[in-house]
Amino acid sequence: MTTTIDELRFRINALRAKSRRKEVAEIAFALEYLSLTVSPPLPGDIFSLYLEVFSDPLIFSRKDIEGFISGIYNDFEKLSIDQKGILLEALVNNSKGYDGEKLRFSVGDMIARKYSVQVALDAFRRMWASGEKNSRFIAQFGADVLSLSLPKDGEDRNELRKFEREIDLKEK
């Protein structure tokens, strides 16, 4: 039996009240599976479910919610340019509330790997400038991911070094 958008929306909304880890994982898997069955761009109703998860503190505070990051990561190429921008804004704007360590790692990793270096660094700068502990954690980890994936020289590496110097100056 195929899960419908309405069923998933109902189950996601139920996460606000209570959830089991298994339930969160099942919903994330069902949403990812549903998104695998559609052609690009990702339909707005599916995308809106991901946004709801990453924007609602009563939902993103649940354990194992990073499974939804995995789902959108795997379908990232199906996102339209506008959807990518909206997703990034939701992640940046809500990053201060991302208490789960795995969620913070997942968000930083996805931004570093799926967005251009300039876009990722801009997002990390905004997170760092917020002064919020969780946002800064994501920004630092994302910069570390970029550091491991970029060539040793070049314009992108220079921009990363500049960001790293900015972080060092603000920490002192």
Image (tube, rainbow, N blue to C red):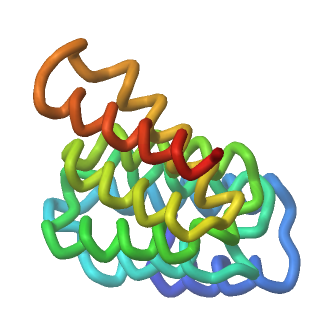
Report the residue at 42% width, 38% height from top: 165
Picture quadrant of residue 159: top left
Picture quadrant of residue 15: bottom right
Report the residue at 87% width, 77% height from top: 18
> In the figure, 37 relative to 60: above or below?
above
User: Where residue 57 sits in the image (x, y, percent)?
Assistant: 70, 79
> In the figure, 55 relative to 96: above or below?
below
User: Where residue 148 sits in the image (x, y, percent)?
Assistant: 39, 19
User: Where residue 109 sits in the image (x, y, percent)?
Assistant: 46, 40
User: Where residue 122 sits in the image (x, y, percent)?
Assistant: 31, 58
Is residue 2 visible from the viewing direction of this image?
no
Of the pair 28 and 147, the residue shown nearer to us = 147
Report the residue at 46% width, 76% height from top: 51
Of the pair 165 and 33, the residue shown nearer to us = 165
* Relative to 10, 120 lies left or right: left
> In the figure, 131 relative to 7: above or below?
above
